[in-house]
Each structure stands twice: as structure tokens, then as C-alpha cells.
Amino acid sequence: MAQRHRILARVLSITSDEKGRPAVDTSELLRVFGMIYNDTFQESVNDSQVLTPKDREETGLLTAEIARLTAIVERQERELGSVKDEISWLCARVEAAEQRMLAGPGTKKKWWWR
């Protein structure tokens, strides 16, 4: 059971986990101290987002590979649909053959059967 305590002149709340260790929720830190801004972090993120020619080439290759695999999947789905249709047709043929066998030569025909 988590217990809540007030610290920093009753401004920041901490909790205790199952083992009794104190813990501060991140949202509680943001509520009390606000957002932390670091200009060097923002610059490093922007620098890492620049694509090099090698990255552009690799992105192009991956896009082409995705298109090729998508086409393969679509073709396989079409083939699967046609195979399912063929299986349904064969099941109907087997069922019709079973019905003919049940009413085979060993059964006496009634006069109203034609």
C-alpha cells in the first residue's frame, strides 16, 4: 500500500512503494518545478534528424522493398481467394457424389423417382 508524504514545505508529494522505498512521480515533479528546457538537447535532436545521402539511399531502397513485398502479399491474397473458391467447389462436388452413392444401385427405386 502506497503512502503519501509531503516534502519541500508541503509542496512535493512522495509515495512509498511496496518495499517502503520513497518514490516521486514524474508528473509531480513537473507540477512543482515545471518543464525543464535544455537548448543543447534540442540541438542534438535536430542534428540527428538530418538525413545524409547514404540515409536517403537506404530509405529509397527500403521504400522499394516495402512496395515489392506489398505487391507479393496482394498477389498471395488473390491466389488464396481463388484456392478457397476451388476448395468450396470441390466440397460441393464431393457432397453431390456422396448423395449419388447413397442412392446407388442397391436401393430400390420407387415409381415416383425418375
Image: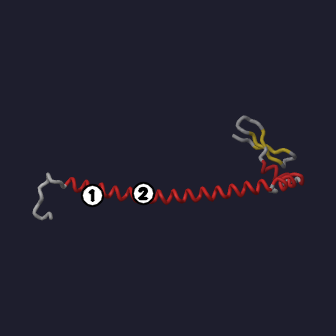
Mark 2 sits on what residue?
84
Please indicate, yes or no, whether residue 34 appears anywhere in the rendered image: no
Disc nearer the start of the sequence (1/2): 2
Q: In the displayed structure, does residue 7 sit left or right of residue 95? A: right
Residue 95 horizontal/vertical position (percent): 29, 55
Mark 1 sits on what residue?
96
In which quadrant is the N terminus drawn? top right
Find numbered disc 2 in the image and state the secondary structure of the residue it sits on: helix
Q: Of the residues shown, which amino acid type is indicated by label 2? A: Lys
Between 52 and 15, which is closer to the camera in this rendering? 52
Q: Quadrant of residue 60?
A: bottom right
Q: Residue furthest left?
A: 111
Q: In the displayed structure, does residue 26 sit left or right of residue 84? A: right
Separation (CA) of disc 1 from disc 2: 18 Å
In which quadrant is the C terminus drawn? bottom left
Between 18 and 66, which is closer to the camera in this rendering? 66
Task: Tell me the number on the disc at residue 81.
Answer: none
Residue 9 horizontal/vertical position (percent): 87, 47
Q: Quadrant of residue 22?
A: top right
Residue 46 horizontal/vertical position (percent): 84, 56
Q: Determine the residue positioned at 15% across, 53% down.
A: 105
